[in-house]
Image: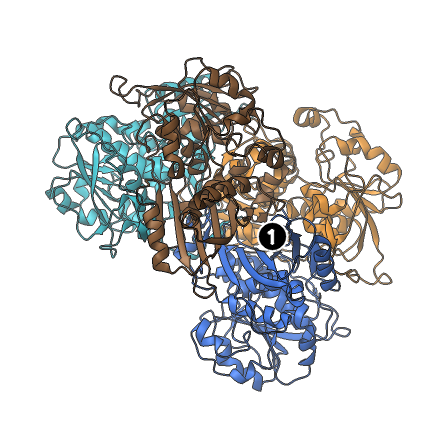
Chain colours: A brown, B blue, C orange, D cyan
Amino acid sequence: MTISEAAAPDSSTADATVSPELRVAIMGATGYGGGELVRLLARHPSVRVVGLAARGRDDQPVAVSHPHLSTTLHTIVADIPDDVDAVFLALPHGAAAQMIGELIERKVAVVDLGPDFRLKNAADYPRWYGFDHPRPELLATSVYGLPELHRRELHAIAESDVRIVASPGCYSTTAVLSLAPLARAGLIDDVVVDAKSGVSGAGRDPKPEMMFGEVNESVKAYGVAGHRHVAEIEQELGLLRGSAAGAPVDFLPHLIPMTRGILAACHVRTARPVGQAELDDLYVEFYADERFVSVVDAPPATKHVTGSNEFRVFVHSDERTGRVLAIGVLDNLVKGAAGQAVQAFNVLFGLPEHTGLEQLPLAP
Amino acid sequence: MTISEAAAPDSSTADATVSPELRVAIMGATGYGGGELVRLLARHPSVRVVGLAARGRDDQPVAVSHPHLSTTLHTIVADIPDDVDAVFLALPHGAAAQMIGELIERKVAVVDLGPDFRLKNAADYPRWYGFDHPRPELLATSVYGLPELHRRELHAIAESDVRIVASPGCYSTTAVLSLAPLARAGLIDDVVVDAKSGVSGAGRDPKPEMMFGEVNESVKAYGVAGHRHVAEIEQELGLLRGSAAGAPVDFLPHLIPMTRGILAACHVRTARPVGQAELDDLYVEFYADERFVSVVDAPPATKHVTGSNEFRVFVHSDERTGRVLAIGVLDNLVKGAAGQAVQAFNVLFGLPEHTGLEQLPLAP
Amino acid sequence: MTISEAAAPDSSTADATVSPELRVAIMGATGYGGGELVRLLARHPSVRVVGLAARGRDDQPVAVSHPHLSTTLHTIVADIPDDVDAVFLALPHGAAAQMIGELIERKVAVVDLGPDFRLKNAADYPRWYGFDHPRPELLATSVYGLPELHRRELHAIAESDVRIVASPGCYSTTAVLSLAPLARAGLIDDVVVDAKSGVSGAGRDPKPEMMFGEVNESVKAYGVAGHRHVAEIEQELGLLRGSAAGAPVDFLPHLIPMTRGILAACHVRTARPVGQAELDDLYVEFYADERFVSVVDAPPATKHVTGSNEFRVFVHSDERTGRVLAIGVLDNLVKGAAGQAVQAFNVLFGLPEHTGLEQLPLAP
Amino acid sequence: MTISEAAAPDSSTADATVSPELRVAIMGATGYGGGELVRLLARHPSVRVVGLAARGRDDQPVAVSHPHLSTTLHTIVADIPDDVDAVFLALPHGAAAQMIGELIERKVAVVDLGPDFRLKNAADYPRWYGFDHPRPELLATSVYGLPELHRRELHAIAESDVRIVASPGCYSTTAVLSLAPLARAGLIDDVVVDAKSGVSGAGRDPKPEMMFGEVNESVKAYGVAGHRHVAEIEQELGLLRGSAAGAPVDFLPHLIPMTRGILAACHVRTARPVGQAELDDLYVEFYADERFVSVVDAPPATKHVTGSNEFRVFVHSDERTGRVLAIGVLDNLVKGAAGQAVQAFNVLFGLPEHTGLEQLPLAP
């Protein structure tokens, strides 16, 4: 791939004597989520990436699948080392549930970017994902890895033998963070979540409808029969509200001609009129201590957060319609996937939550 | 601009002895809507373009503003000829209302692509457009140029001295055609219209936020305080329903990184449950005789209609949420502007409605 | 695919009594080139499309592969009818050569969009395409279908039993038309052709490197070991120059993030100094009678010709470097493929050359 | 702009006791180059940004011009502080030369991203930039800030009172680094540099031709009469070669539909035949100690380096044509502008050259 690498970097990680190094591995390293994990963890000052795995790619330099990461000099291995502190899983749904037993036995912390441990109700797996969960007893102890909502639970399992973080879906993070303050205040009567995503959320396998010629200069809706992330969104809004039952969420995703970014426009019919001042207070207070969340006063663009772990939300009380509009944006591969996974990992290991996630967004 | 034009075309228009030639002019020819009118009318078999006007561009070859139209050899003129049969106006709002008196006196048919004659209630102009309408008495006789809904009225004014066609807004056309069958059946209880548009709808004047570097790889909502097209949408849905009052439409437009195309996702809470079969019947019947409308059985992409005068709509009854979803797509510069204007012009002049509008969509 | 088609169109073709209808078929109708042929031929006033074939797609509505063409109501068939006047082939290389025997026997005119009959020297096939030509004797009688250069030969075979038009490659058309006047004047001493293409030229099969996420916001060169179109370019420039030998053409193609369009920048070292006035005269005269070629006085953009059969060229004599720069643009699917094939077909059947090709470019 | 910022970050800079903090200011902070400087310097461990200036923007939060940088909480000021160690200038050409006197008097180090001190020959300023240089005597002492070629000179001025770094143009960096090993070896007989750039290189002022609707789905050449960066390219290649005279460089830039990135394809006619092995050795050796340069064995895409300070180059000896092809890519706003400026700044201040520049590229 590369004839002459850039000159070998002196280590950019912190001094091992002051900051104990955590050894981590990534399974499913050749997809978009996996690549983003490599990008972030390779510059994480308390982490050493000691193994990248990906089916059918043994001994392949990471540069083959991720040319932009060629300077990391990593190579895909058949098996990750035994002595890892944590493993990140970026695998097709069902795969993590299959291998979780072995990982638990090794007492390694697991941060799963897939859906296998996100839903608390085992019956949701056959319904939304088409498989019976092989280890339903683990759904109760795994933590939904949205630190803004479940930080305490992440701390709670930090010393456990079984540490499973179920990193949320990209749409779910966008929708739930956009609506959380309203949900907790019990103000959501009914909600339409109309979301727009770049194509990287669809993964990397070549599909005819994801070719440049089909996507560029076009927009379309998909998943009209019910997108899987609805299950997570309803679960989390229910938890915030404090009651499982609630009006079903009308969720519609769109594919738009860009690579990264999700914007969710949440059209809320509120239980009672909510004015702009109350709305602002509600959101500002809710997110007051959150490093990665900004409440903004103009509709945000996805480009404002590209490449970063930021989430931005705008709320508007519409006097004409009596509705509330909440618009959230994030980078689906960072705050919507790898970045959020690293954030939860940091919490789990007692590191400052933003460690390795301090990059500012890249624009234009 | 051009050193050597392509060899002079022999006339592509119909033989003057068999197809009487209509003389038309375009005011505001250098914008995107104006350019699209030139593109379509230059190949319209019953039309001869006899004058293109644009402020500050006198004597400029059309190729300066529209290099793609250089082979038409048109030049911008200071004044359009007196003896035109029809004039198309593609001007900033307010301008058409100012000059309408003179055009009426000349008894020329007017097809206005701007908003000056779309709203029936004169009070809506100061509210939505910030000006008092100078000729409110003309609002009653002008026809909202959506042939699928107002064909009869277009026929009715064909022999009048005053012929004003108010060609609909691009978002309005998308939303109204997506919802018309439901509206006429009285089935809309409440509706969220979440729309996505390419940038050409924002016109051609250079604005910082429309630069490629700002738009590409980004999506944002705008007009949260109330987009002007809401007034038209509510007017037309009210007419279809047969009663002026109705729940206000929650309309939210987004700018996405593409040039042409609008997609409107209409999330409808229906007055009573409506199953898929009833929904299909309703739409198929409503649009049975419409040349430019297709009811499709999968979510359409804007790319399916690019460059054509087609409108496509998909409807879905969602059992989980109890809502109806209607998704419509069109090319904002054709069916959303110039094409629809030509379609209404054809009706007004007794031509087959699709004359000059037979181009198939351009994909990929 | 479609629940309710747009209302059935009345025929848009010319009156059968005055314009005898030619019956044509398309093999390979589901690719991009095939779709473009359908788009153009469906509106060609002297043509009736009587058969679309595509391997493995029997009985499939054309809307499945080409949703934008759904209103044509065509269906893919297993076998094209016997009584066709012409067949267009849009097939992988080698396939046309295999089936040519049968088509010749049926005395049907063949317009091949692939490379199987473009090269006059049979030895070029194993070298550039990796197969031995099964019917080398046909290479002499087939005509390279660039009407601007080979119109007379197209006329010459019009009454033959064997009528094979080898429609040129997209890069070849761009480079050859950009350089033809200089080549014929014997002025090219040495040339670098640096070309940029949209992705549709790479066809429609899903490939990882053609996914939107890989192509957008990126540019790369490819084919550095020698792109196949070089063989055609050198053949045609040699014919124009009147001698087979000449400096090899340095040709480098790039993939850029757009769907349609090719731009070729041809950097020419001339045999003797050529000033701007001489250059202009040379090009204007050479293309004086060409309907589809414009010599322009500013660097053209591919967007100036999108969707049309136009070719535009700009020439510049650079006093500082002593070189000549020729920049040509076209739409790779129209003048670079389907449109040019229809143009040659028109010549072959004695129709006005621009019949069915009068659409103006689509911009923005 | 922002109602509620993300929670105040704890300082991400290094401990002041171990790493003395350098105080820097940026003039012209609201353009694309300025924004990129803020992005990089805000995370530079040895730097504290103490002043951002931009004409007509006094007291404006940086978030107004750079929403993506809102979490930095910077505000534009009228005057930068007196006690800065270095100032970065991202200004229109001519502006830096005007204000340099005052900056020199204050003995502040100047890193100028504009062209005012790049050219050694004062006569080149009226020729290429249309102004007479007001301080020609400074051209000799300023250093062309390409560390890979002028590192020693940067060190040499580190202790001087007058420290002016003339950061190279984006095209110049790409072309010069692509060709440097060949130039130093005296192997370039003649070269065509055909470059492709994203739009951010054209700056941020709204121009009609930079609107999304004009740029997307299009490519065009520009600057055919002579792009200003030619002067730098010829100067640096001359220095490498060791003789001022040489064949003029044929340089042609293109605008392609992307935001970031430059690719330069350099078509070289060599003084004598150069085989692939010799070519590889030449490049590998030349760049052996360079942290930011990789010699790669397949044509690189601009996306491989987006957001990073990397430069990648591919070289190919073409047996058929006898030419050498060198293809270089970089991110025009990082290695082509702000990143390279920070790199030179690091050298000037004795910091490890990659300090603050360790971000991996962002893909997809």
In terms of depth relative to the viewer, which is nearer, B345 or D271?
Answer: B345
Q: Is residue A363 visible?
A: no
- Position of C175 relative to D177 (above/below): below
- Quadrant of res D188: top left
- Position of D239 relative to B122 (above/below): above
In terms of depth relative to the viewer, which is nearer, B198 or D217?
Answer: B198
Residue D66 location in percent, x, y? 33, 48
In terms of depth relative to the viewer, which is nearer, D289 or A119?
Answer: A119
Q: Which residue is mark 1?
A: B302
From the viewer's perspective, tell me whether residue C176 is left or right of residue C49.
Answer: left
- Position of C148 relative to B162 (above/below): above
Residue D184 location in percent, x, y? 34, 24
From the viewer's perspective, tell me whether residue B152 is left or right of residue A153.
Answer: right
Element under disc 1: helix
- Residue extending farthest top: A82
Quadrant of the image containing the C terminus of chain C: bottom right
Which amino acid does the dot numbered 1 rest on?
Thr
Q: Is residue B342 visible?
A: yes
